[in-house]
Amino acid sequence: MIRRAFTQHPASVGESYFEHFVHASGFGFRMILGGIACMLHGVLPFLFVKTGSKQIETLHGRMVVNRSKLPQPIDFVI
């Protein structure tokens, strides 16, 4: 039951636990950096003018557009 808690969601997106960890950590890191750039842009509007929107586009492309092209795993309930 505990193992399932760690593997069910990664399997639902076609990844192992480690693959999901790497991808999720990469997303989180990009989100943190994009957020810092947005805060700096709020104070200094001439800096990072397109950084926030570019990060959103990149992450959306990686998470939604590209993942939807992968075959979806079949979820068996036992």
Image: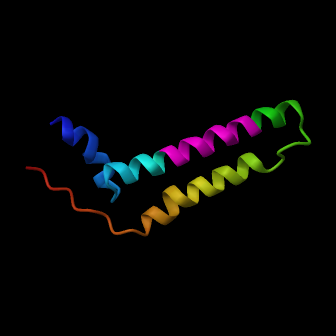
Which residues make up the magenta segment? 25-37
Position of residue 41 in the picture relative to residue 53 (left or right)? right
Q: Residue at x 83, y 37 (%)?
A: 41
Q: Position of residue 19 (x, y in %)?
A: 39, 54
Q: Residue at x 30, y 54 (%)?
A: 12
Position of residue 76 in the picture relative to residue 25 (left or right)? left
Q: Main secondary structure of the magenta part?
A: helix
Q: Is residue 7 above or below residue 75?
A: above
- Residue furthest to the left in view is 78
Q: Position of residue 9 (x, y in %)?
A: 31, 47
Q: Position of residue 15 (x, y in %)?
A: 34, 57
Q: Position of residue 28 (x, y in %)?
A: 55, 41
Q: Is residue 73 magenta?
A: no
What colour scheme does the image use?
rainbow
Q: Is residue 2 above or below residue 78?
A: above
Task: State the residue in front, 55 or 2.
Answer: 2
Q: Residue at x 69, y 37 (%)?
A: 35
Q: Residue at x 22, y 62 (%)?
A: 74
Q: Quadrant of the N terminus?
A: top left
- Residue furthest to the top in view is 43
Position of residue 30 in the picture relative to residue 45 (left or right)? left
